[in-house]
Image (cartoon, grey):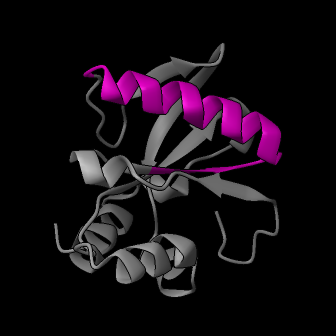
Amino acid sequence: MAVTDHRPWTYTIGLADHGLPELVMLGPNRRAAKVLDDLAGQLLAGLGLEVGTRVTANGEHLLIGAVHRDHVERGLVATWVAFHEWAGLPMRMQLFQVLTESDGPHPVLSARSLASARNLLGL
């Protein structure tokens, strides 16, 4: 997915405080919020995620992908960063993209993307 993609997106804030990955999803915000809320509840209940995991949330079949370094460097999670700076919390986090079947091919799942994201996020 190109960095120039202009679809709306939604992401979680607060899962990292529980030792869990934060999630980001492209698409209409209400739909994404419902999917992420359901998936966050599953994570809090013990669901484990990694790149390539297939899950169902809010009735949608999903694939977990890596977030490319360019997205993070260009401000994708600026509110998350600002919140953690304000609260004096550590900035280290794991970040996954939640992909739907309608997102098409998933180039973000390349080994290079995953390695870049892990390097940027200190994983």
- Residue 7 image offset from top left, x and y in percent: 81, 60
Q: Quadrant of residue 6?
A: bottom right
Can you say which quadrant of the picture contains the C terminus? bottom left
User: Is 51 on the left or on the right of 108, as rendered?
Assistant: left
Q: Residue furthest front?
A: 87
Q: Which residues are magenta?
A: 23-46
- Residue 108 image offset from top left, x and y in percent: 49, 58
User: Is 25 on the left or on the right of 80, as rendered?
Assistant: right
User: Is 18 on the left or on the right of 1, as rendered?
Assistant: left
In front of the other: 112 or 74 = 74
| Residue at the image position 44 percent from the left and 47 percent from the top | 65
In front of the other: 12 or 52 = 12
Mainly helix, strand or loop, the magenta region?
A: helix
Q: Quadrant of residue 86?
A: bottom left
- Residue 104 image offset from top left, x and y in percent: 70, 42
| Residue at the image position 45 percent from the left and 33 percent from the top | 40
In front of the other: 43 or 62 = 43
- Residue 67 image offset from top left, x and y in percent: 45, 62
From this view, report whether residue 23 is shown above or below residue 36.
below
| Residue at the image position 66 percent from the left and 13 percent from the top | 59
Q: Is residue 50 magenta?
A: no
From this view, report whether residue 104 is shown above or below residue 42.
below
